[in-house]
Image: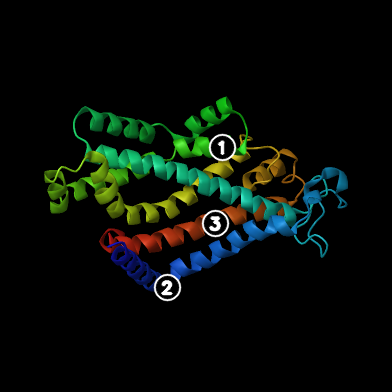
Amino acid sequence: MSSVATQRRRLAAGQFWRRFRTDRAGMAGLVILAIFILTAIFGPLLISPDALDVTKADGDRFDSPSPSYPLGTDEAGRSILLMLALGTRISLTVGLAATFVAMVIGTSVGIMAGHFRGLSSHALVGVTDWFLVIPFLPLAIVLATVLGPSTLNLIIVIGITSWASTARLIRAQTLSIEGRPYIERSKALGAGNWHQMSRHVLPNVFPLVLANTTLTVAIVILSETTLSFLGLGDPLAPSWGALLDRAFSTGAVSQGAWWYVLPPGICVVLVVLAFTLVGRAMERIVDPRGAAT
């Protein structure tokens, strides 16, 4: 029985990949993501830890791009290119980890809100609506200020403030699944709530969760950049948002050091665009009718 299920999953995965390969926008986004992921994996391994050491920097302050420093230097004479490569791992790690937290919370709340009835369902929907109504940035700033500036706290703050839209989407899908005949048969055979949600509802909403994850990562990376730019991230971690924060706080803009501002901003735009292209392509495959409207 398990071998049949495994074979079906492989067949579905192969069919999904064949359809995804025909989507030019999705493949373009996947190529961009692959470049950044390889940079995040191998960049810190190939760069010396002394690259961020201010006492060992041998470049001039705000030195313009040159063969020695392709993207110029910062206020301490450190290479912007090396800092950008090191920041890729931090920004992607925060984005993926915070998205995982948001997906787990949103999927769990959405399935329970759609499966249960009565007061418990109304309470879950009410909490979801509250998080949707409250503006994200003020809530995130308050939480980040209370918890303190660190990478872990940044992941927690973004994760617990970004799950509501996923919960709303999964709840709607769960309500649709709950009306199918096999759910009624499962209830008639005495299956419990956990069995119904984990064995019948979750596998059916998982493709939608996966497609929504790639779209949420883009929003989360923008959130991380915003909070780090406001000085609420780890001050010792050279994420893209932290680089932009230091560029403005050290007067790089007023001194015309465009190479300190543009590269981190372009990286944020490219990664957000790549995740959006991949997410939209997956959405078109998973739900072609919804993507067409």
Which residue lies under the disc numbered 2? 21
The residue shown at (82%, 54%) is: 63
The residue shown at (21%, 40%) is: 192
Residue in the foreground of this view, choosing between 11 and 55: 11
- Label 1, label 2: how far apart the Cα atoms are: 35 Å
Whether residue 221 is visible to the viewer of this picture, yes or no, is no
The residue shown at (31%, 41%) is: 110
Label 2: how many residues lie within 10 Å, few (<14), some (14-19) or many (20+)?
some
Residue type at mark 1?
Answer: Leu
Residue type at mark 2?
Answer: Arg
Is there CB contact under 8 Å for labels 3 and 2? no
Q: Nearer the viewer, mark 3 or mark 2?
A: 2
Which residue lies under the disc numbered 3? 271
Is there CB contact under 8 Å for labels 1 and 2? no
Q: Position of residue 51 (x, y in %)?
A: 79, 51
Specify whether 289 is left or right of 219. Answer: left
- Label 3, label 2: how far apart the Cα atoms are: 20 Å
List the single residue furthest toward the top.
146
Q: Position of residue 225 (x, y in %)?
A: 58, 44
The residue shown at (38%, 56%) is: 211
Which residue lies under the disc numbered 1? 154
Specify whether 64 is left or right of 279. Answer: right
Element under disc 3: helix
Element under disc 1: helix
Residue type at mark 3?
Answer: Val
Is there CB contact under 8 Å for labels 3 and 1? no
